[in-house]
Image (tube, rainbow, N blue to C red):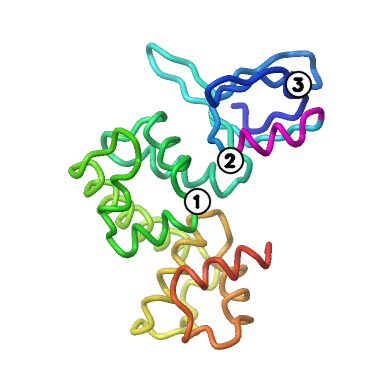
Amino acid sequence: MISMIKGSLLEYHDNIVTILSTGGVGYEVDVTSKTLNSLIEQKEDCSVYTYFMVRDDMHKLYGFISKHEKDMFQLLLKVNGVGGKVALSILDTFSVLDLFTIIYNSDNKSLQKVSGLGKKTADRVILEMKDLIKKLNQEEINNSPNQNKQSSFTKIETHIEDAKAALLVLGYKINEVENALASIVNIRELTTEDIIKTVLQKKI
């Protein structure tokens, strides 16, 4: 499994980059526009998180400037009918935070702005992503040593619970999330996306 590549940017074209690793091997990686722009700025000191997709007719590397984007990409791949090309296109259109907002608000029209994504597929992405986030959230809670500990927030405050679930999906541990949420002033007055954004900015 190739999980990260560090090296120099050799060439790029149509969001496909070639990175020469320190080991002298050149890797061709499909990236988003955001990642490409970041790599162009880095030039000689590039670093990308990667996902290696193996299919019968294809071996392909996808690259991301942040681990959050990579985690979201892998979650999108679990949606029925969504492959690497569509998942990357979604992340090329929306930031991770914007995508969470779209999913929680069931904003089908915004999601259809993604090239090649029709109404039916957009509906399926929203529905299945909600289910996946809830499932992964519950698994994290069940696997936590503090699983019997009552949450600091009531179930009525669904915007806080939604933010917690989203952060768990992004790879944070439940104790990290609980501590971060507890440190946010006036959290009950914030929206789900504002809470997520605040925690991401804390860089826990």
The residue positioned 22% from the left and 49% from the top of the image is 123
On whether residue 95 falls in the magenta region, the answer is: no
Q: Main secondary structure of the magenta part?
A: helix
> Looking at the image, do the residues carrying marks 1 and 2 touch, with CB atoms under 8 Å apart?
yes
The amino acid on which the numbered mark 1 sits, given as a three-letter code, is Ser
Q: Is residue 182 left or right of residue 94?
A: right
Q: Report the residue marked by disc 1.
A: 95
Q: CA distance from mark 1 to mark 3?
A: 27 Å
Q: Report the residue marked by disc 3.
A: 21
Q: CA distance from mark 2 to mark 3?
A: 21 Å
The amino acid on which the numbered mark 3 sits, given as a three-letter code, is Ser
- Earlier-in-chain disc, 2 versus 3: 3
The residue positioned 38% from the left and 13% from the top of the image is 56
Q: Position of residue 110 (x, y in %)?
A: 32, 53
Magenta-colored span = 34-44
Q: Quadrant of residue 118?
A: top left
